[in-house]
Amino acid sequence: MSEGLQHYLWTKNCSFGQTQIRNSFKTQNLIEMPVDDEKFLQYHSRNLPLQILGKEALEDFRYERVTIAGVGGLGTVIAEQLAACGVGKLRLIDQDFVELHNLPRQKLFFEKDIGRPKVEAAREFIEKRNPFVEIEAIHTRLDESNAFQLLEGSSVVIDALDNFETRKIINIECYKLGIPWIFGGALVETGNVMSITYKENTPCFHCLFEESTDEGAPTCATAGVYPPILGLIANIQVEEAIRILRHMKPLLESKLMVISTADLSFEKIAVKKRENCPVCGKTPRIRRARGDSVREEIHHPVLGDITITGICGSGNFIAHPQQEPKWDFEAVAQKLLNRWEGKRIGKSVVRLLLGDGRRVQVAKSGVMTIVVNETVEEAIEICQEVLSVAVQSIEQERQT
Ligand SMILES: [Zn+2]
């Protein structure tokens, strides 16, 4: 290969948008950053010369929160790559536990992690390798009752799920919150990516997939998934997220990327906004959130500091303890179900109905989603009441 061609490929590979990288190695970045951040600079020294990252981006990214819904074949790659690009806050949401068949594709997990919540094992792995990232591990199922609170406060949401139902919920809640999100999916040797920004004349997920359902659809369990396609899709989602964080136009806005490793084809299919879309169309049936967000801190004698967040007047709040409680969740769930009507959802969640339309979902991780009639005061009261019953079971455990 000639030197000229090599140079062309290098500059082509390093270009983005209309801008070509020139004079990439700006070593002065190393001098300008504050001294106490020396280790941070060393850690990211190979990112500093890049125009898409570089000093300015790394400084900004430390305060950005990206939420990843699903920590499986896509989510594990996405989480690790975002941390590698300097994103400071990652919120991981997944209800599953690590299983043996995850290990070939999901590189954040080891055999010793089998049976642990995926979000916990992923947090441990990434934090060991990256001391600059703050990870919220939310071990719960994302659904209609908690999506708004779980996604709130994110700069970007990345979908790493395996079903249409939850993606449709993300689409609605991100629309309400005005948060861009990146759809991604892979099966067998094919994968899709699309960025949804809700900007004027750009389509949302519903515009394209309204008719799609999970019923009878093949899954990774039945049809399989080729590990390389997962890496490709996840990395393209990361690229789009980085562009959004850098306030650049994502390349897959109004475009569905379809990739197949079977013939190494990369296609971008134009997608149009549907004027009558019930989510983003001219007369949407879904309202954008209004009202200010609230954030209250409470202190619990056993669980420590708990942050309660939500939107004023929405009646939906989420309580996050700073520390994961050391409790026997079986005993806690039983105690709560003796006191209130409700049911278990999987091994790690209990849902309680408190009357008058008020309900609470308590996860093993201590995170509570609270639906009340209106105010944050009501949510705080319920949080404390639920905790007092839950903590009774801890006290009883200690005495026996
Ligand atoms: Zn739409």
Image: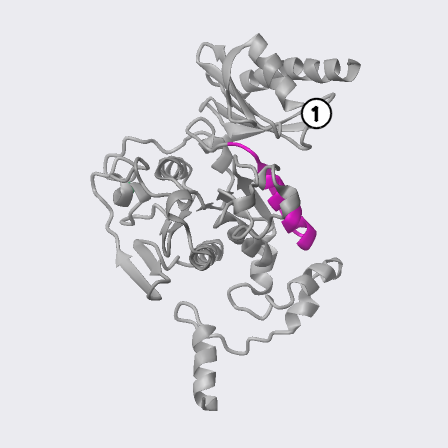
- Answer with left or right where residue 177 lies relative to residue 122: left
Secondary structure beneath label 1: loop
User: Mark 1 highlights which residue?
Assistant: 303
Q: Position of residue 193 (x, y in %)?
A: 37, 53
Q: Residue at x 54, y 16 (%)?
A: 378
Quadrant where the C terminus is found in the figure: top right
Amino acid bearing label 1: Leu
Q: Residue at x 67, y 23 (%)?
A: 328
Quarter of the image with the N terminus is bottom left
Q: Position of residue 232 (x, y in %)?
A: 44, 59
Q: Is 162 contained in the magenta span?
A: no
Which of 210 and 114 lies nearest the eye of the viewer? 114
Asked whether the viewer can see residue 381, the reply is no
Is residue 234 positioned above or below 143 on the image? below
Quick check: 146 left or right of 114? left
Q: Position of residue 298 (x, y in %)?
A: 66, 24
Q: Which stretch did the figure color magenta?
A: 119-140
Whether residue 42 appears in this view of the structure is yes
Give the image quarter of residue 321: top right
